[in-house]
Image (cartoon, grey):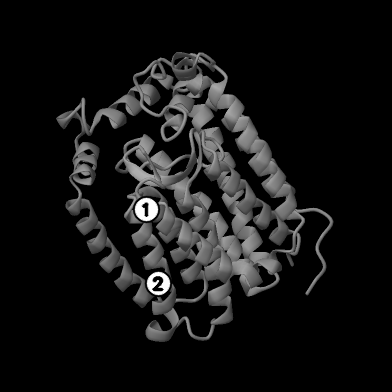
Amino acid sequence: MPKARTAPDMWMIGAVLLILAAGLVMVYSSSAVLALREYGDAFYYLKRQLLFAALGIGMMIVMAGTDYRVLRKYAPAVLIACFALLLIVLIPGVGVVRGGARSWLGIGSFGIQPSEFMKLAMVIFMAKYLSDRQQEIAGFTRGLLPPLAIMGCAFGLIMLQPDLGSGAVMVGATMLIIYAAGARLLHLGALAGIGAAGLVGLIIAEPYRMKRITGFLDPWQDPLGSGYQIIQSLYAIGPGGLIGLGLGESRQKYSYLPEPQTDFIFSIWAEELGFIGGAALILLFLVLIWRGLRTAITAPDTFGSLLAVGITGIIAVQVFINIGVVIGLLPVTGITLPLVSYGGSSLTLLLTALGILLNISRYSR
């Protein structure tokens, strides 16, 4: 095995730090009015975001200096622990309900989302599992079915919360790993059809999901209900124009747009910084994804390559869903924008995952 380089991928580090710094600015800009009204402190959300960002950067530095290959040994134990957390969070009185989902563990305003831990744990486990069984992945029964069963169990537990957004990101990243490992396109195509049918069933089974779909297709059908968030998001993006209204000058953050500092922070970004600002942020994400895929291609072993694909997949799928929702291309799912949206465990875990990706880049061929 080749020795590590002296430095990780500097392009990746630059993209991460620029997105994170811009995100901190936008968290304050989008949340100051809300924080002042609810807590009497305009810096409430920013201070908490800074705390989790500092913790995440610390974890990123630690993981960037830790040989990623040690994760192979602990992958099964970490996955089992995350399954246990997903079960514990479903217990009434233990799991905390926020936004209609029992998806949090914690005390008071501090909490963690087990589903966030599961996304990273599943990626690490799948990279180990599939790198150990490369010769079997082309077969369905022995190759493809076991990892799908494991992923399906995790997705089922997440849906019991329910949290379709986190489940969709985990499934998307896992399927990218399975594809990169050499699964047959015929099998994946058949599974995609079954998955689409299952998704339709999940949507029909819950009235609130059906309302989100109808609100997505025609938000003006229920402008004060299921279509409210999309309409207010578009009201933010439209006036932004080419250069935006100016940093801090958003109108929609004045109690019009729900969750301006989390799920719909890109709406405020586009309103204040315009098309140019939005395009610049997307370009930074594309640089990050490009360097992640390059790391996967040049990784010295299959485990590192699949792990890099999975971590990059988490970012890519999450960015695609979040921005797709904000601009009205996808139904509302409750997905945050990586490194930008306000969030505790999600930000810390993502920076930890990026630390692993940076470590893999140190061994690039």
State the image coordinates of residue 84 (x, y, percent, origin top left). Answer: 47, 61
Q: Quadrant of the N terminus?
A: bottom right
How crowded pointer 2 is (Cα within 10 Å; few <14, some 14-19, many 20+) is rated as some
User: In front: 76, or 189?
Assistant: 76
Q: How many labels does the image show?
A: 2
Q: Name the residue under label 1.
A: 90
Residue at x-position 53% and y-position 20%: 29
Residue 287 seen from this side: no
Q: Name the residue under label 2.
A: 148
Residue at x-position 54% and y-position 16%: 42
Residue at x-position 32% and y-position 43%: 330
Asked whether the residues under the numbered discs 1 and 2 touch, taking CB atoms below 8 Å apart as contact, a structural biologist would say no
Considering only vertical position in the picture, is 159 above or below 236?
below
Disc 2 element: helix
Q: Which amino acid does label 2 sit on?
A: Leu
Using residue 98 as the reference point, say whether residue 199 is left or right of it.
left
Using residue 343 as the reference point, say whether residue 99 is left or right of it.
left
Q: Which amino acid does label 1 sit on?
A: Leu
